[in-house]
Amino acid sequence: MSKPFDYSKWDNIELSDDEDDVHPNIDKESWFRMKHRSRVEREEREEADKKKIHEEMAKANLRIKEIKKILSKSTNTNEDSDSDDDLEDLDGLRAELQSLEQSNSDHQDKLDAYEKNKKWNVDNMCHVVEERTIVNKNVGESKFSSTGYALPKEEEVVVLNKEEGKAGEEKVDDEEVPTGKMSSANISGETKAIKPAVASSTAAPVANKPKSATVAASNAAIAKFQQPQPEPEATNSVSVSMLSYHEFTEKYADVVEEFMAIESLDRSKEFLIQKGDILLQENASNYLLLASLEDEMNGFHEKMKLVARQSQIISNIAELAKSLQRHPGNVIVPFFQRLDNKELYDGFMDGVNQFIKRIEVRAVEKRKEIDEERAREAKEHGAASQDAVDISTIPLEERLGPGGLDPMEVFESLPESMQLAFESREKEQLEAALGAMTPDEASYHMQRCIDSGLWNA
């Protein structure tokens, strides 16, 4: 019977970060750090002791070699010598040799005890046998387009070009279309639009025209299609992300509003794939947040719940892209695939419901803040109205200013900019109105204001 594997060497595993023998009143992380530091200090003391023992054993071994050499030499040369001094020296060397050997034996026993009682931990349980660094030669190549979406693989491009080339060769008649000056790309793309015209001409009664006329018509059609056509304007996600919130809402508010009204998750996925470069932006997320808050404040609770769900779709896609370190446009499909799992879908809806509760609480707070602001403004406006005096009710003799002018008449004769400044009671606005006039005109109006009492000099 074969001997079973000996697992006893793993009996002394010490895992300071995986022990729960800590008092509830002691911070667990601090306890782990303290135990780890104690283990490191103990190992350092043991290593220092081992180093000292090895040094002493090395010195003792060197001395043992010298003593043995002396004893062997004296045995060969002085076999007939009976001198007491020589015998005493040899006895002393033999005693020293025995003492050194005993000391080495004790030191070795201590080293064996250290090794036997050694505690295994994460620092000494394993060691690196081989290290290797592999550098990807394609690390500098970009796998994403300028808008952040994944580019097709090289082999897919090659296969696509081959298929387009074959389709172009099948559709082009070599006798009618001179291909010498046309690229394969032009043939594959442009002859698709040309062939129906050629086919219809051959099927029509007028197809019995000379061959040269048919060739000329085909060449004219090809030349027309070879002219550079204006490409449709593509939305650049980089330029969209650089827009301010005001600019974004002016340009793309209708897109976000359309996404807000989608109830189906499948339709939401399709719409995000089409308009992800617009919707997967921080401005779009802010727009959805503010829209849900506004709907709740206006009493559209059901609409708010739908907008909140759409807002959480955008937020969760952004978080998933951040965790995977990928462009948000590339995780749209994986995100909706996760929602097919009932547990993940329930977790997503729990997050939506929590978001809805926060919106409801914030709507109450916001409505309260608005009511307080309106009440404060009404109070200030009421106080100002109470302090104001209707000057038209004062008799003319009593309302004349120090210069004998009627303030009502002078006010109505002032330029509009000065009237607005007096109504707002802002000195800076009055100074700006006077600065826009000539010095003589400004002096004239200000003197009349002083004489009527509108301005105190």
Image: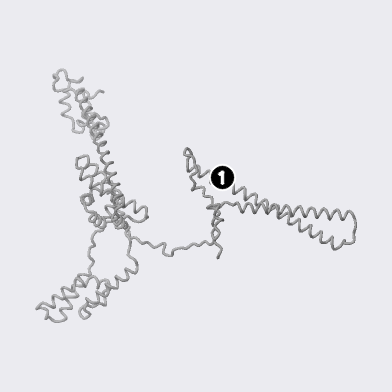
The amino acid pointed to by label 1 is Ser
Using residue 54 as the reference point, say whether residue 457 is left or right of it: left
Quadrant of the rendered image containing residue 152: bottom left
For this rendering, which residue is in front, 105 or 57? Answer: 105
For this rendering, which residue is in front, 369 or 411? Answer: 369
Give percent across and percent down for residue 454: 21, 24
Decide: is 195 above or below 311.
below
Give percent across and percent down for residue 418: 21, 31
Using residue 105 as the reference point, say whether residue 7 is left or right of it: left
Q: Residues within 10 Å of mark 1 (few under 14, many from 20)?
A: few
For this rendering, which residue is in front, 69 or 279? Answer: 69
Q: Residue furthest front?
A: 1
Q: Residue furthest left?
A: 205
Decide: is 416 above or below 290.
above
Quadrant of the rendered image containing residue 89: bottom right
Tell me the quarter of the image containing the C terminus. Answer: top left
Residue under the point 46% across and 63% down: 135
The answer to whether residue 170 is visible is yes
> Label 1: which residue?
38
Tell me the quarter of the image containing the N terminus. Answer: bottom right
Residue under the point 59% across and 52% down: 118
The answer to whether residue 451 is visible is no
Give percent across and percent down for residue 146: 32, 59
Q: Secondary structure at mark 1?
A: helix
Residue under the point 33% across and 61% down: 150
Q: How many marks?
A: 1
Quadrant of the rendered image containing residue 178: bottom left
